[in-house]
Image: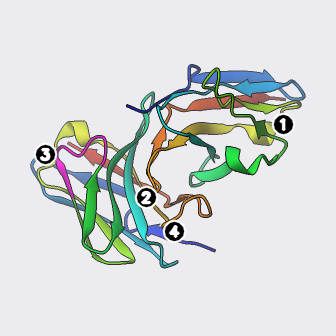
Amino acid sequence: DVKVTQSSRYLVKRTGEKVFLECVQDMDHENMFWYRQDPGLGLRLIYFSYDVKMKEKGDIPEGYSVSREKKERFSLILESASTNQTSMYLCASSLRDPFNSPLHFGNGTRLTVT
Amino acid sequence: AQRVTQPEKLLSVFKGAPVELKCNYSYSGSPELFWYVQYSRQRLQLLLRHISRESIKGFTADLNKGETSFHLKKPFAQEEDSAMYYCALKTTSYGKLTFGQGTILTVHP
């Protein structure tokens, strides 16, 4: 069974801090994604990666960056956290052809920026 | 640009009643559509995809290209169907999904 693990379930950070959210998958998936989930707005894609060291901006990349140095790990970085980045962050992974592979999600990291 | 709209934030039905969760999309290409579900305290997971034309947990969804809709239906709702449901549209070969706003379904006993 595919497992996508997000390192923290809850995080509380201060405004201006640099924040790292880590995600690891154990099924050799090529694609990895970071979404944020907000009530009434659904899931919005921040960044995705289709291979090691490759990344593409999603719909709301401002204020975020990502790193994919190894195939199994995809990190989301908030360069200078702000209160409007308080949200639930979901990591997901899939095989290169998602027709045969759905997105597999982690449990999420609830980030609060004070 | 692609867009997915779920017009109902909240939907309440009684056990045994039919349920329909609405989803409309906007996309100039050939759409691939999905329904994802998140039960309480569980991770988001795939419920069904239009290409498979399958029924999962009694749910079905038909792609209507004329109306650009992909509504999720179940003839007899169960309490365990209570969850958050997201409709999603695939727009690239890399598997990027555009999600709707989500609908919280509550099935009352």
Report which residue position mark 3 lands on. A15
For the record, the magenta segment spans A58-65
Query: Who is closer to the viewer here, B46 or B31?
Result: B31
Report which residue position mark 2 lands on. B94
Q: Secondary structure at mark 2?
A: loop
Q: Secondary structure at mark 4?
A: loop
Q: Do residues under tags 1 and 3 come within 8 Å of each other at their CB atoms?
A: no
Q: In whole angstroms, how far apart are the C-alphas of marks 1 and 3?
A: 44 Å
Q: Is residue A62 magenta?
A: yes
Q: In whole angstroms, how far apart are the C-alphas of marks 2 and 4?
A: 9 Å
Marks 4 and 3 on same chain: yes
Q: In whole angstroms, how far apart are the C-alphas of marks 4 and 3?
A: 36 Å
| Amino acid at dot 1 | Gln
Q: Is residue B7 magenta?
A: no
Residue A70 x, y percent position in the rendering: 31, 80
Residue A36: name its quadrant.
top left
